[in-house]
Each structure stands twice: as structure tokens, then as C-alpha cells.
Image: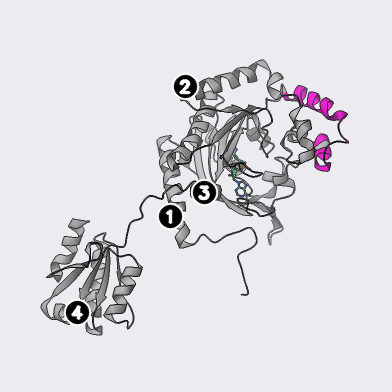
Amino acid sequence: MKYQAPRGTQDILPEEQPWWDCVYRTVARLAREYRYALIETPIFEDAGLFTRLGEATDVVSKEMYIFKDRGDQELALRPEGTAPVCRAYLEHGMQNHPQPVRLWYTAPNFRYDRPQAGRYREHHQFGVEAIGDEDPAIDAEVIEMLWRLYEELGLTGLTLHLNSIGDQNCRPRYLAKLREYYSDKLDQICEDCRGRYEKNPLRLLDCKNERCQPIIAGAPAFSDYLCDACRDHFARLRGHLDDVGIAYTLNPRLVRGLDYYTRTVFEIEPMEAGGQSSLGGGGRYDGLIEQLGGKPTPGIGFGTGIERIIINLKRQEVPLPEQPALEVYVAYQTPAARSVAFKLASDLRRAGVSSVVASGERSLKAQMRHADHLKANRVAIIGDRELADGTVTLKDLREGGKQTTIPLIDVVRQLDDQG
Ligand code: HAM
């Protein structure tokens, strides 16, 4: 075979679509309930939108798909959804709308990562962003929405990890403590961590390398260094989660993989944890809009990978909602009935009754097999006798092939009534 889907990408075949459909329907319904409005942004953006966000993170420094277009402009395939939505918020003057502006999206993202189970170079995310309000009630709302998504889909055994990583007031003090703690352990940590120590010490806590684990375990916790405002914000958020009965695990090592986060960060993990097991996560980014050239504006959101949701739905053997069946397969005995059959299928569809008409030179028997294969509820047969009488024989495949013959002009009404 000459071509295959690029490494780390996948075709979403028709047999997989019911899973996607089930997730998309649930996210759209939740977004409606919570009054989030749909936004779509381009698949590529000015590369600078992302590079200025965190050159010390893998997503930006190692995994972006960057290219120059024919006009020599440097563009990047979207690696994540938050920065584009914030760009759109500013570009379209949404700071003048009532705040917070609540937005949601589903979109493909591109990261040049090492492909493995649950980790792809193209993945799809459902995400929300609530921009313009720093009230911890919004943090709790966003977390509740993500939790409810998994709950409504039927996933169980999930853990919500929660942490606060402070703001520009308390972070420098914490980072100084963290650096001090690591300063005499640099020969015990991995090479990547030695780079992190210089460039982005918070990410030291996120290292997956075995040899760094005992050192991470002894590191100071941010919660001991939060300023009063951040401590109060975090306590109120936890209070709201308690109000709605959402259990969380405080995880002082949780820092997330992108650099724009402030205060609240969270991740939801399935029971069978692993290196890249996070089902979804997010947090506050109170400095991001300002970094993109706007006035200081708080924001919070999450992203959840749809592929990972589906992997977990299958792993937990969550049953899919029943798919609507093909209602009528229209078959004909001889070519003379083709035209009547074709028109009948068309009339049925116009009445909202799904139907497929036989095609080609197949025998009636082969057409019946085809109807079976398509799992049709009924077959409408136009044989020579029916053609002469102006009737149709309906064979109900769900009821052992029970047959009735009715006038052609009554078929659409009768099937429409029966639903
Ligand atoms: P993220 O943690 O990088 O956050 O991605 C969110 C989710 O996308 C992950 O939890 C995971 O389910 C899925 N995901 C990420 N990378 C891959 C991959 N290579 N293959 C498959 N699934 C993947 C963000 O992107 C932030 N924009 C989330 C956010 C929104 N924070 C605030 N607002």
C-alpha cells in the first residue's frame, strides 16, 4: 500500500462513530445546561501565539508543528485550545460582554509526541473556558462540569487531583524554596530536570523519571507557601466542591504541562493509572490574557481528550446507547419495479423514515441478504404482483418475517405513524 495515515494519527471509521457521537451529544447537552456558547477557531494560528506561552514546556518547545506558509508567515497547527480562545476573546472585544464569558469547543490538536496507547500526534479535545471572573465558584463550576461529563457517560473509579500553584505574589517565594531544596541534589536528578531547574523549576515536580521520584516526594509543597489571597481562593473552591459533593485528592505535586497556569490546577485520572493516563485537566490562567496584550483578565478552563474518554468507556465496558436502525430496505423483484422502488424510498425519507433502496442487478434473495446485513427493521418488496396491483409487501424482519400487503399510496403514512 502506497499511503497510510501519518504516524500518530488515526482514521475514525464508521464503526467507531457511535462512540464519538455519544461523547459529542453529551458534551453539547452539558454545554447547553451550563450555558456555555460554542466557539470555533482556526486549525492553525500565528506560531507566536503559542511560543510566547511557555518555551520551557515540551508542548511548545518540542512538540509543535510549525511551518512557514507561502507568504513566509510562521504558523503552527493548534497544539491546544486555550490560547486561541483567549486570542479570539480579545480580538472580538468579548471583554465588553457580561463577564465571565463562557465558551466551549471540540477541536483537533496536534503535538509531535512519541505515539503510544492514548497518546497521539493528532488528538481531539472537548474544552471550556470561562473568562473574566476570578470567583472560585467559577473554578468549582468548571470542575463540576468535567466531573459530570464523565459521570453522565458512565465512567467510574475516577480520581480528581487538585492543587493550587499560587500567583505572581507567592510563586517567586515558593520557587526560591524549591530551588534551594534541589540545589544540593542536582547530581541525583535526571538531565531534563537539570534543565528544568534552570528554566522552569515548577516542572521539576512533574518529572516521570524513576530516579527523580524520591526527590520529588521530599520537595516542599506549594500549599505551605500560598499568600493569603491564594490560600483563601483555594479554600473557597474546596468549599464549593464540598457543596456539590465532589470528592478530590489534594495533590501538592500537580503542576500541569503548560506554563500559563496560576492558582487552581486539576486533573482527573482513571483507575488504571499510567504515564499518560490523565483523562482531562485544566486550571486558572489569570495572567494569560494580559500576556496576549489585553488588560489583566482572569480565566479558567479544562480540556479532555475524546480518544482517551473512548478508550476508558471501552475498557470499562460501558454500553453504548442503542443506535437507530435502518427502518426500511426497499427491494424489487425485476427491473420493471425499479422506478417505483426508487420513488418509494425517496418518499419515505422525506417523511423522516430512513430507507435504502436496492441497487444493481441483485436477485431478490441477494437483496434480502443485503437488508439483513444492514440490519433493516423491514423490507418493502415490490414484486411483479405488487407492481400490477399498486401494492407493497412489507416484511418485518424483527418479527420473524411477518408479512402484510398494503396499497402503495398508504405505505408512507403507515410507516410514518408506526415510527
Ligand atoms: P492538556 O492537559 O495538555 O491541557 O490536554 C488536555 C487533555 O487532552 C489531556 O488530559 C488528555 O486527555 C488530552 N491529550 C493531551 N495530549 C494528548 C495526546 N497527545 N494524545 C491524546 N490525548 C491527549 C490543555 O490542552 C489545556 N488547553 C486545557 C485547559 C483548558 N486548561 C485551561 N483551559
The numbered mark, 2 or 4, whose residue comes first in the sequence reads 2
Q: Which residue is mark 4?
A: 383
Residue nearer the viewer, 107 or 179: 179
Q: Tell me the quarter of the image containing the C terminus.
A: bottom left
| Percent coordinates x, y for residue 195 in the rendering | 83, 40
Q: Quadrant of residue 409?
A: bottom left
10 Å neighbourhood of mark 1: few (<14), some, or many (≥20)?
Answer: some
The residue segment tinted magenta is 171-197
10 Å neighbourhood of mark 3: few (<14), some, or many (≥20)?
Answer: few
Kind of residue at disc 2: Asp
Q: CA distance from mark 1 to mark 4?
A: 35 Å
Determine which of the numbered discs, if any, sits on residue 302 in the image.
none
Kind of residue at disc 4: Gly
Relative to 52, say whether 396 is above or below. below
Q: Residue at x 43, y 35 (%)?
A: 35
Q: Which residue is mark 3?
A: 315
Q: Are marks 2 and 4 in contact (CB under 8 Å)?
A: no
Q: CA distance from mark 3 to mark 1?
A: 16 Å
Q: Which residue is mark 2?
A: 243
